[in-house]
Image: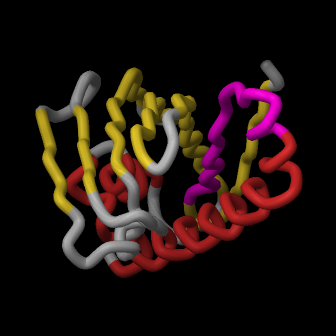
Amino acid sequence: MPAFAHTHETTIAAPVTTVHALVSDFRHWPQWSPWDDLDPELERRYVGTGVGASYHWKGNNKAGEGTMRFTAITADRIDVDLEFRKPFRVRNEVVFTLTPVAGGTRVAWTMSGERNPVFAVLGRLFLDKAIGKDFDRGLASLKAAAEAA
């Protein structure tokens, strides 16, 4: 199966600890996630904190359904196992890397995984651009939330 990886980055004028707090707790994701506003009736369920904590969502056709789970959390990196159930079944790895820079934090948001041949073609034609726009929108919202904190 063809592998893929997408990374989008931004610099945030806030300390790593502020950005880390927004990313390492699923309860803060509604403040910045680009997908959280796709369904005003979105059902959310949070379990636990730290490594092993999970977030399950279920919504309309745009929001879909799935689960995320923190698999590793360090001072400069947050790893998430992402499993979509709807509108299609797929499992990906998400990594946020937080690097201190002059005046703030450099955030790299990477999603990687494998695609079946059909999704590999769809990815190149449509999905990669759509995901890139979502990542950029999410990073802009994360930046606004962290800089307002």
Q: Give the range drawn in magenta.
A: 105-120
Which secondary structure class fits the magenta region best?
A: strand
Question: From what the image shows, is residue 119 above or below residue 140?
Answer: above
Residue 109 falls within the magenta-colored stretch: yes
Question: From what the image shows, is residue 100 above or below residue 114?
Answer: below
Q: Where is residue 73 in the image (x, y as percent from the top left)?
A: 38, 28
Please give the count of numbered marks on the rendered protein: 0
Q: Position of residue 61 (x, y in %)?
A: 41, 64
Quadrant of the drawing holding the N terminus: top right
Q: Give the residue displayed 26% in from the left and 53% down from the top.
A: 58
Foreground pick, 82 / 61: 61
Q: In screen coordinates, is 102 left or right of 78?
A: right
Colour scheme employed for the rendering of this structure: secondary structure
Q: Position of residue 35 (x, y in %)?
A: 44, 65
Q: Give the residue displayed 73% in from the left and 56% down from the top.
A: 127
Quadrant of the drawing holding the C terminus: bottom left
Question: From what the image shows, is residue 129 above or below residue 72?
Answer: below
Q: Give the residue displayed 79% in from the left and 48% down from the top.
A: 123
Q: In screen coordinates, is 141 left or right of 71?
A: right
Residue 132 falls within the magenta-colored stretch: no
Q: In screen coordinates, is 19 left or right of 26?
A: right
Q: In screen coordinates, is 101 left or right of 53?
A: right
Q: Give the residue displayed 56% in from the left and 31% down from the top.
A: 92
